[in-house]
Image: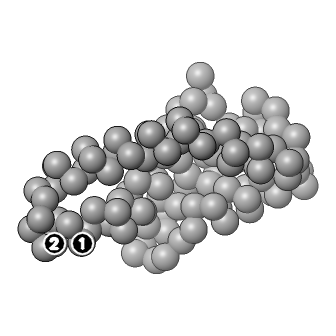
Amino acid sequence: MWTLIAGGFMGWALGANDAANLIGPAVESRALRFWTAAVIASGFVVLGAVMVGSRGFATYGAIGTQTLVSSFIVMLSAGITVAGMTFLGLPVSGTQAVVGAIIGAGLV
């Protein structure tokens, strides 16, 4: 359950960090209202995760073996990193945060 919560937190942090890239131009040009653009973007994010997410899991799985505890630590630490950088207004890559967390968990 805690791993699912940490993964949800990571998803929220990624959404807070990357949502403007997806819907910003459409909202700013007034082509779509904010909530309409947010719902459409959310739908496509979920669709992409369902359709090709397993490829990403296979890639991350090749980096190192993950246990339930290490998965929790990876998602929580990457989520804190992305959320913190987003809060500070600094650019951050979610992919690099996750890979760094996997490497860090593997070293411990």
For numbered disc 1, what is the local secondary structure? helix
Residue 4 to residue 47: above or below: above
Pinpoint residue 99: horizontal percent, then vertical percent: 73, 59
Residue 102 to residue 4: above or below: below
Q: Residue sitting at 90 percent across and 55 percent down? A: 107
Q: Residue sitting at 43 percent across and 46 percent down? A: 45
Residue 23 to residue 105: above or below: below
Q: Which residue is mark 2?
A: 28
- Residue 25, labelled with which disc? 1
- Residue 52, labelled with which disc? none
Residue 9 shows in this picture: no
Name the residue furthest front.
Answer: 51
Please tell me which residue lies in front, 102 or 46. Answer: 46
Q: Residue sitting at 46 percent across and 53 percent down? A: 13
Q: Residue sitting at 81 percent across and 32 percent down? A: 67
- Give the residue type that dot 2 points to: Glu
Colour scheme used in the picture?
A: one colour
The reply, left or right, for residue 29 in relation to residue 63 is: left
Residue 90 shows in this picture: yes
Proximity of marks 1 and 2: CB atoms separated by less than 8 Å: yes
For numbered disc 2, what is the local secondary structure? helix
Task: Count neighbours of disc 1 (C-alpha within 10 A) and say few if under 14, some if 14 to 19, many if 20 or more.
Answer: few
Task: Count neighbours of disc 2 (C-alpha within 10 A) and say few if under 14, some if 14 to 19, many if 20 or more.
Answer: few
Name the residue furthest top.
Answer: 1
Q: CA distance from mark 1 to mark 2?
A: 5 Å
Quarter of the image for the N terminus: give it. Answer: top right
